[in-house]
Image (spheres, rainbow, N blue to C red):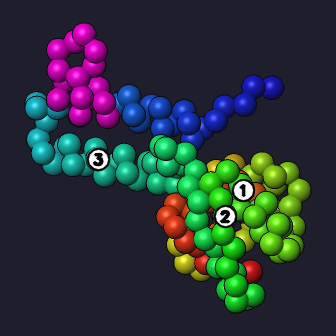
């Protein structure tokens, strides 16, 4: 069975769409800058792009961040190349997990603070946008810090 990385596919589509229509000319073609569009149309497109890409990985790859475990009153550093689940386990924190691929939901944790970069296949757009829960096996912090109800 062929798997499609939906986050990558959506991001690639949005990058091409925005480049061709609103920002930069395509190679060896006349510039298409969106001059024929009103400023509100361009602004609306930028807002739509921001909304559609919320929770997608950073374009330069994963970043290190710190997670605070509210119930345990401690923090764990998560290196860029390590999953949140692996960092928690290395720190002695037990989080139930089964698939480690974001498909089963076993590792779901409540988020108390911070924005999440979602990579799971479970949460819908509204759940992702709420930043209230995350699958720690594949998802990360969008910024430098998260607080989990762990």
Q: Is residue 148 visible?
A: no
Label 2 crowd (10 A; few <14 / some 14-19 / many >=20) = many
Residue occupying the point 40% across, 53% down: 51
Checking the image for residue 78, the label placed there is: 2
Q: Is residue 92 visible?
A: yes
Taking the magenta stretch, the answer to whether it contains residue 31 is: yes
Taking the magenta stretch, the answer to whether it contains residue 109 is: no
Work out whether mark 3 precedes mark 1 in sequence or the reverse, and give the earlier one: 3
* Whether residue 31 is situated above or below residue 139 in the rendered picture: above
State the quadrant of the C terminus. bottom right
- Residue 106 at x, y percent in the picture: 83, 63
Residue occupying the point 47% across, 54% down: 54
Q: Which residue is mark 1?
A: 83
State the quadrant of the N terminus. top right
- Residue 93 at x, y percent in the picture: 83, 74
* Image marks 3 and 1: residues in contact by CB distance under 8 Å: no
Task: Determine the secondary structure under disc 2.
Answer: strand
Work out whether mark 2 precedes mark 3 in sequence or the reverse, and give the earlier one: 3
- What's the magenta bit mostly, secondary-structure-wise? loop
Front of the two marks 3 and 1: 1
Checking the image for residue 122, the label placed there is: none
Q: Which residue is mark 3?
A: 46
Q: How far is the residue under mark 3 from the one under mark 1?
A: 31 Å
* Image marks 1 and 2: residues in contact by CB distance under 8 Å: yes
Magenta residues (range): 18-33
């Amino acid at each position: 069975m062929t798997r499609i990385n939906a986050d990558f596919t959506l991001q690639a589509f949005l990058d091409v769409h925005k480049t061709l229509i609103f920002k930069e000319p395509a190679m060896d073609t006349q510039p298409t800058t969106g001059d024929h569009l009103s400023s509100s149309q361009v602004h609306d497109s930028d807002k739509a792009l921001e909304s559609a890409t919320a929770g997608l990985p950073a374009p330069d790859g994963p970043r290190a961040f710190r997670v605070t475990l509210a119930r345990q009153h401690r923090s764990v550093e998560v290196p860029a190349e390590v999953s949140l689940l692996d960092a928690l386990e290395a720190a002695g924190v037990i989080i139930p997990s089964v698939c480690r691929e974001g498909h089963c939901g076993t590792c779901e944790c409540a988020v108390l603070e911070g924005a999440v970069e979602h990579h799971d296949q479970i949460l819908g757009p509204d759940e992702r946008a709420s930043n209230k829960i995350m699958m720690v096996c594949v998802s990360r912090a969008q910024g430098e810090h998260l607080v989990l109800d762990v």
